[in-house]
């Protein structure tokens, strides 16, 4: 668990340090970010109790949906959004994942992006 600030807002992040063993594995060279803008962030840009519950249920669904294809390595909450950081080998299934995730949390705007990140730079910003 990490705590800090980002653009003047509180930042909370949790990353799986054990995932570092996968960082040099070419099967995990594509980074996927799933961002959820919060509907009612508090003055620090963090979710309220109700939204925390919704995001926890969503996280469980996300883990289930990507289990055979990607590894969830971190979760960042800051500046009115929560982002899930994952790594995978191929991107051909990500469009379908996006549709599944939108259905899993219809009350929120679910954003999905993917980029090549063989050096795991996103992960390494938090895990040295």
Image: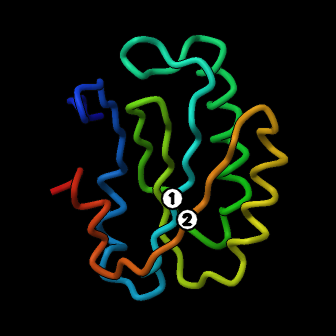
Observer-nearest residue: 28 or 117? 117
Q: Is residue 99 left or right of residue 51?
A: right
Question: Mark 1 sits on what residue?
Answer: 33
Question: Mark 2 sits on what residue?
Answer: 113
- Distance from disc 2 to disc 1, alpha carbons, whole Å, reads 5 Å
Residue 119 vertical placement versus 80 (above, below): below
Q: Quadrant of the C terminus?
A: bottom left
Observer-nearest residue: 103 or 60? 103
**Dividing the picture into quarters, in which one does residue 76 lie?**
top left
Residue 50 lies, in percent from the top left, at 66, 13
Residue 46 vertical placement versus 13 (above, below): above
Residue 85 lies, in percent from the top left, at 46, 56
Residue 40 lies, in percent from the top left, at 59, 18
Residue at 73% across, 71% down: 95
Q: Quadrant of the N terminus?
A: top left
Residue at 69% across, 42% down: 109
């Amino acid at each position: 668990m990490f705590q800090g600030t980002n653009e003047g807002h509180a930042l909370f992040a949790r990353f799986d340090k054990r995932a570092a063993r996968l960082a040099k594995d070419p099967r995990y060279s594509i980074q996927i970010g799933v961002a959820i803008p919060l509907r009612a962030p508090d003055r620090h840009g963090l979710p309220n109790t109700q939204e925390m519950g919704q995001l926890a249920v969503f996280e469980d669904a996300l883990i289930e949906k990507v289990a055979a294809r990607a590894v969830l390595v971190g979760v960042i909450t800051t500046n009115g959004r929560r982002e899930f950081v994952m790594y995978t080998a191929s991107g051909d299934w990500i469009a379908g994942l996006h549709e599944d995730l939108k259905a899993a949390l219809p009350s929120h705007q679910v954003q999905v992006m993917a980029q090549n990140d063989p050096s795991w730079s996103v992960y390494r910003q938090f895990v040295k």
